[in-house]
Image (spheres, rainbow, N blue to C red):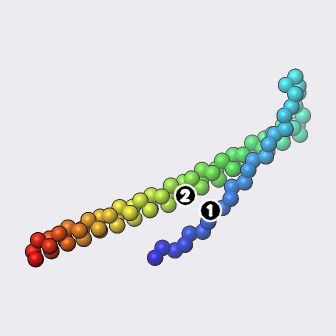
Amino acid sequence: MAEPREPLRRIRKARRLSPSPLSRKDVTRGEYNRIIDILNERAVILNDFRDAINELKRANDVQFKRVAQVQADLDVIKQAWNRMKMLV
């Protein structure tokens, strides 16, 4: 029997940037640093999503391999059963 898997961890949401007037041309150092921090945070979140998707793909591949093995075993049993029926 397979061991129960731990549930996937929640991936946090990215902070939103506040809109600025389109006519504004200058940016303060604090605003620039805040934007860079938010972009870095979003990169971390995207990496978490990528890791979660890869983990799900690996789990899916394992399940497909298990199903294929069960199907192959079932085909062997079915062939043996048919041979037994022909001998009787």
Q: Quadrant of residue 62?
A: bottom left
43 above or below 65? above
Vertical comparison of 86 with 29: above or below: below
Circle 1 residue = 8
Q: Amino acid at mark 2?
A: Glu
Q: Residue furthest left?
A: 87
Tell me what residue is drawn at x 72 percent, y 54 percent.
12
* Image location (x, y in percent) of residue 83: 14, 70
Residue at the top extreme, as displayed: 23
- Looking at the rendered image, the quarter that the C terminus falls into is bottom left
Residue contact between numbered discs 1 and 2, judged by CB atoms under 8 Å: yes
Residue 3 position in % (x across, y down): 52, 74
Give the label, 1 or 2, closer to the camera: 1
Label 1, residues with CA under 10 Å away: few <14, some 14-19, many ≥20: few
Residue visible at 14% across and 73% down? 85
Relative placement, left or right, of 37 versus 65 is: right
Please state which of residues 59 and 27 is positioned toward the viewer in this rendering: 59
- Position of 69 with respect to 40 (left or right) is left
Instruction: Say above or below: 32 vs 65.
Output: above
Labelled disc at residue 87:
none
Label 1 or label 2, whichever comes before in sequence order: 1
Label 2: state its secondary structure.
Answer: helix
Residue at 69 percent of width and 55 percent of height: 11
- Badge 2 local density, few (<14 within 10 Å), some, or many (20+)? few
Name above or below for residue 51 compared with residue 66: above
Can residue 25 be seen here? The reply is: no
Side of 86 relative to 34 (left or right): left
Q: Which three-letter amino acid code belongs to the residue tagged 1?
A: Leu
Residue 7 versus residue 30: which sits nearer the camera?
A: 7
Q: Which mark is residue 55?
A: 2
Q: Identify the element where label 1 is drawn.
A: loop
Q: Residue 20, percent across and down?
A: 86, 31
